[in-house]
Amino acid sequence: MSRTRRSFSASEKLAIINEADQYGVTQTLRKHNLSHSVFSRWKESFNAGGATNLQSYAKQRNPELDAAMEEIRLLKNIVAKQSIELEFKTELLKKSQSLEQRRSK
């Protein structure tokens, strides 16, 4: 039986961090069934950049970065296709040259 991954909003994460400060980390983590490593990551993110850093990774994605990654993917596709074409043409040229050499003998 597999468990589904839980996701917390930034406000829920902030509330859990505040609750841990008031009532203790261990008690709060047990109440919300969280691991200490997850809580530590949230706390570091909060300390580094405030509540905006607590947003999920999906919300933090940069649209410019996504567009650049898509362009890179398309360019790699083009280069791969051209490489295959070049290899095919080179093989064809080698075969035609060897046939011409056989005929000339």
Image (cartoon, rainbow, N blue to C red):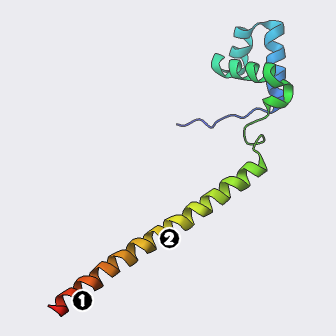
Q: Secondary structure at mark 2?
A: helix
Q: Nearer the viewer, residue 7 or 46?
A: 46
Density class for disc 1 (Cα within 10 Å; few <14, some 14-19, many ≥20) is: few
Rendered location of residue 15, percent (x, y)? 84, 21
Q: Secondary structure at mark 1?
A: helix
* Alpha-carbon span between mark 1 and mark 2: 27 Å
Q: Nearer the viewer, residue 57 or 28?
A: 57
Residue identifier under label 2: 82
Query: Where is 53 relative to 71, above or below?
Result: above
Rendered location of residue 83, percent (x, y)? 46, 68
Query: Where is 82 relative to 46, above or below?
Result: below
Marker count (numbered):
2
Residue at position x 80%, y 29% in the image? 53
> Residue 27 sits in which quadrant?
top right
Q: Is 71 positioned to the left or the right of 20 in the image?
A: left
Rendered location of residue 46, percent (x, y)? 80, 22
Residue identifier under label 1: 100
Of labels 1 and 2, the one closer to you? 1
Q: Is 63 positioned to the left or the right of 99 in the image?
A: right
Residue sitting at the far front: 104
Rendered location of residue 6, percent (x, y)? 69, 34
Residue at position x 72%, y 35% in the image? 7
Q: Earlier in the sequence, mark 1 or mark 2?
A: 2
Q: Is 94 positioned to the left or the right of 65 in the image?
A: left
Residue at position x 33%, y 76% in the image? 91
Density class for disc 2 (Cα within 10 Å; few <14, some 14-19, many ≥20) is: few
